């Protein structure tokens, strides 16, 4: 039999949700009085069910939305579903359902989960990227880029995931593995569609300076991914002949130290190098082997640096020296020019390669402390003086950089150049569940775009969608066979679908007019409401979704479709929620249920599985913290916790678990602390409901004057959290303290002014609690005789004179861990604070019998006793 709840949260939640629905609380007012506030949480993949780790994003965003409603803003808070792509399709395959049915079922479940958490959205604006009414306009976006010369098809080496059986963009490969499934990626040459994002590289970089309300971490990640490099492109002429191998370098000051040139096995000059070359067979064999190696094998610092000397010589600019041309595995075709100059003395990778292949190491930048008698033990990559550099000897190498760059330009053997690490966005996917690319190929007319009036190009519903390496759409004659829009002759549709990140690169524009069938968005509404005022989501999207969305917005701006060129004004990236995961050396990751957790907590760390073929006895589990993941068995569904403790307790713990931008460990047992707080607060406020409203709180004396000051000080702190860093964990701690003070003061409230002060503090506490625990706040608001929703009442303003508290609560730490708290006068001297902290009972317990090596006092914040 289930234990009786400490307060009737289930009934309270039902009443609150019914009230919000009656009042249409979250329906956006696009026009009218009040400041507009577009709050947007990144829309989720409907590839499964939400867990408590996802809740941090949505609950934090919901608290902000509710606060903004109380501030009187016209709030737009929509929700939708990133429903196309690998996550949803893989989930459908695992579940044995068609992707459409699987996706719609997941959407229904996840929508219910969001509602149970108490997250409010304007559901009249709900979108799903897999709906034809949406992907019609995704295809329209493709056509805009195609006509602007920003979408093109070419044969290129691509990243192939053998598990997902599709191509991946560079940004979707992490350490050589597929970001979705972890399988090592393989190189393949395929005809693919690309978006020319490189045309916007400099603007994407320059405009980062406009994003002053984005986390510096995200700006740095985008800056590094775009990767602007200033250097010199040098011409190494093959001798004899006129063929040139071009190398880009950021270190022209080291050109006199070149002892070889290395090129990628995919370099277009390779076959011309092999022509008539007695080493052609060996060169082609090595190049084929290197091309089959994955990204990690070719680029990891620990991987062998392999190569083959082609027997061909190239002439070094300025020095005229002839050096060997090598084909190597560690140079990639898509970076720089696909060839690099080898300077072993001043590049660590070149140094390792030269040592492995007995190539000369020539120092041309002398270190400040000179060249060791036995030569360099490792590459010198720092500053120094030019040596062995002809007419540039003796110059500081920073000056040598400029002088040598001038010289190569003057002699016509090189040119200053800016390059970017960013590569064009590969959007082709050999999968079924995605927006079809609106292109046909005609024998007479070539590549022809589908006319806009013929959109959407619909996905055929009856295709065998399981991946084989070829697009499933290619197996559907009804889809493939069509007529050419230009000449009317026979044509074939493009059978690849678009990367799901194309769908999410513009979804925030569709929410303003989600049912418009004549255009993708309403320009006037967009210009009034965009950029998004507050965007909230995971930092893992820093160089995928966020970069692509910026690119799309700039393209649409340049084509005259929107009046802004950055999509998101402010960005907040929440930290991951982690949980302990358990891994058996034989059985892999085990489900982290209560029984396994209890087993490990009790000291038994061996695998509970009964059979082990590789071990005579059950092996010890590896126990570690990880991001919540189905693959690691450590996800926590919210429903059991909501059923046991209520949605508000789960919300409060989610926000209380730590600073929201930092990683935090989830602990189911700790939810009970917030549950008990809410139960006590429920009982306390209900007990105050009969208190008459008569009396003026300004006349309160003594403890009740202090209570008013505490309430207004708390209001200031909570308001600042919403307007500042979203540190709702400290705001909730402040409410805990205020509730305790209300409870302690209540029995002594007899004078009318004191009773009025008590009611004022309680009402303020309820209104401050409302964004965090909205269901209970509605109940208590009503119980105190207030009408309508608490969210229709304006956010209260604190009295600055009262908010300047006479007392502050400080943390008492022992060896950096909080062991107690102490309320002291705000102007207390350090010595008084120290002596009162030492007198605290809990501090005495933790320091008993141990000498104190150091005491750190931070006035107004903490005392920390460091023990020997």
Image (cartoon, helix red, strand yellow):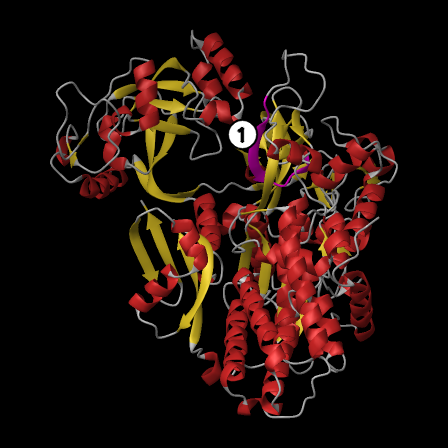
Residue at x 60%, y 41% (from the top left corner): 579
Is 521 placed left or right of 480 in the picture? Answer: left
> Does the stretch in magenta take in 624?
yes
Residue at x 75%, y 26% (from the top left corner): 468
Image quadrant occupied by the C terminus:
top left
> Does the stretch in magenta take in 842?
no
Q: Nearer the viewer, residue 854 or 528?
A: 854
Residue 473 visible in image: no
Q: Nearer the viewer, residue 242 or 581?
A: 581
Residue farthest top in this picture? 278
Q: Position of residue 807 (x, y in %)?
A: 43, 74
Q: What residue is disc 1 on?
A: 176
Q: Position of residue 677 (x, y in %)?
A: 64, 62
Q: Secondary structure at mark 1?
A: loop
Is 676 placed left or right of 370 in the picture? Answer: right
Measured along the vertical axis of the image, is residue 297 above or below residue 519? above
Q: Position of residue 503 (x, y in %)?
A: 68, 50
Q: Nearer the viewer, residue 37 or 144?
A: 37
Give the magenta-colored segment's residue range: 620-630
Residue at x 61%, y 19% (from the top left corner): 619
Q: Nearer the viewer, residue 44 or 375?
A: 44
Residue at x 26%, y 33% (from the top left corner): 381
């Amino acid at each position: 039999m289930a234990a009786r709840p400490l307060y009737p949260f289930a009934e309270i939640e039902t009443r609150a949700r019914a009230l919000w629905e009656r009042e249409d609380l979250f329906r956006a007012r696009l026009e009218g009085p009040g400041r507009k506030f577009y709050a947007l949480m990144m829309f989720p993949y409907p590839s499964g069910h939400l867990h408590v780790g996802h809740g941090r994003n949505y609950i934090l965003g919901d608290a902000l939305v509710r606060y903004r409603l109380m501030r009187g803003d016209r709030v737009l808070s929509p929700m939708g579903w990133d429903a196309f792509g690998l996550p949803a399709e893989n989930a459908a395959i695992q579940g044995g359902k068609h992707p459409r049915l699987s996706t719609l079922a997941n959407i229904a479940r996840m929508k219910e989960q969001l509602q149970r958490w108490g997250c409010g959205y304007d559901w009249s604006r709900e979108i799903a990227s897999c709906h034809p009414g949406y992907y019609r306009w995704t295809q329209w976006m493709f056509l805009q880029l195609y006509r602007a010369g920003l979408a093109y098809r070419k044969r290129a080496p691509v990243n192939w995931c053998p598990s997902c059986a599709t191509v991946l963009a560079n940004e979707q490969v992490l350490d050589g593995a597929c970001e979705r499934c972890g399988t090592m990626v393989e190189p393949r040459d395929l005809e693919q569609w690309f978006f020319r994002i490189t045309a916007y590289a400099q603007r994407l970089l320059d405009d980062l300076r406009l994003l002053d309300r984005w986390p510096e971490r995200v700006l740095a990640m985008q800056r590094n991914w775009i990767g602007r490099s200033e250097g010199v492109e040098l011409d190494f002429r093959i001798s004899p002949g006129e063929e040139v191998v071009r190398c880009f370098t950021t270190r022209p000051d080291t050109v006199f130290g070149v002892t070889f040139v290395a090129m990628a096995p995919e370099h277009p000059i390779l076959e011309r190098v092999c022509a008539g070359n007695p080493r052609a067979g060996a060169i082609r064999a090595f190049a084929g082997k290197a091309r089959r190696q994955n990204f990690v094998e070719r680029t990891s610092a620990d991987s062998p640096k392999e190569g083959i000397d082609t027997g061909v010589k190239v002439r070094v600019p300025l020095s005229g020296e002839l050096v060997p041309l090598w084909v190597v595995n560690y140079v990639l075709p898509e970076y720089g020019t696909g060839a690099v100059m080898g300077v072993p003395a001043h590049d660590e990778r070149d140094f390792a390669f030269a040592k492995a292949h007995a190539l000369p190491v020539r120092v041309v930048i002398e270190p400040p402390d000179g060249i060791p008698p036995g030569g360099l033990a490792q590459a010198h990559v720092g500053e120094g003086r030019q040596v062995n550099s002809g007419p540039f000897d003796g110059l500081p190498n920073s000056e040598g950089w400029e002088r040598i760059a001038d010289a190569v330009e003057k002699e016509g053997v090189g040119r200053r150049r800016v390059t970017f690490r960013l590569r064009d966005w590969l959007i082709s996917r050999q999968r079924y569940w995605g927006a079809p690319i609106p292109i046909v190929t005609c024998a007479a007319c070539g590549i022809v775009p589908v006319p806009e009036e013929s959109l959407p190009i619909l996905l055929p519903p009856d295709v065998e969608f399981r991946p084989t390496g070829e697009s499933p759409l290619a197996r559907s004659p009804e889809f493939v066979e069509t007529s050419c829009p230009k000449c009317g002759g026979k044509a074939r549709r493009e059978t690849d679908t678009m990367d799901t990140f194309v769908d999410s690169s513009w979804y925030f524009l569709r929410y303003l007019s989600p049912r418009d069938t004549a255009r993708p968005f309403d320009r006037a509404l967009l210009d009034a409401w965009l950029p998004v005022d507050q965007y909230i989501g995971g930092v893992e999207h820093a160089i995928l979704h966020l970069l692509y969305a910026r690119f799309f917005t700039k393209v649409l701006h340049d084509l005259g479709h929107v009046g802004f060129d950055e999509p998101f004004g402010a960005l907040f990236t929440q930290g991951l929620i982690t949980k302990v995961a358990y891994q058996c050396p034989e059985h892999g990751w085990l489900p982290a249920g209560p029984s396994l957790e209890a087993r490990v907590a009790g000291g038994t760390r061996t695998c509970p599985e009964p059979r082990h073929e590789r071990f005579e006895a059950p092996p010890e589990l590896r126990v570690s913290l990880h991001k919540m993941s189905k693959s690691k068995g450590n996800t926590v569904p919210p429903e059991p916790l909501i059923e046991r403790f209520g949605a508000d307790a789960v919300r409060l713990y989610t926000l209380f678990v730590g600073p929201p931008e930092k990683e935090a460990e989830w602990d189911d047992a700790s939810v009970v602390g917030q549950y008990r707080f809410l139960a006590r607060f429920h009982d306390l406020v209900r007990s105050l409901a009969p208190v008459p409203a008569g009396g003026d709180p300004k006349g309160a004396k003594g403890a009740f004057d202090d209570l008013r000051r505490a309430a207004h000080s708390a209001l200031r702190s909570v308001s600042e959290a919403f307007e500042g860093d979203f540190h709702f964990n400290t705001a909730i701690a402040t409410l805990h303290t205020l509730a305790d003070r209300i409870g302690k003061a209540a029995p002594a409230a007899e004078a009318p002014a004191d009773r009025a002060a008590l009611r004022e503090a309680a009402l303020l506490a309820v209104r401050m609690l409302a964004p965090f625990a909205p269901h209970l706040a509605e109940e208590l608001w009503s119980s105190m005789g207030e009408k309508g929703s608490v969210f229709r009442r304006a956010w209260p303003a604190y009295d600055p004179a009262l908010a300047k508290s006479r007392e502050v609560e400080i943390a008492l730490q022992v060896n950096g861990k909080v062991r107690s708290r102490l309320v002291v006068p705000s102007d207390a001297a350090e010595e008084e604070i120290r002596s009162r902290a030492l007198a605290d009972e809990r501090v005495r317990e933790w320091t008993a019998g141990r000498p104190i090596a150091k005491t750190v006092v931070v006035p107004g914040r903490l005392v920390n006793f460091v023990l020997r």
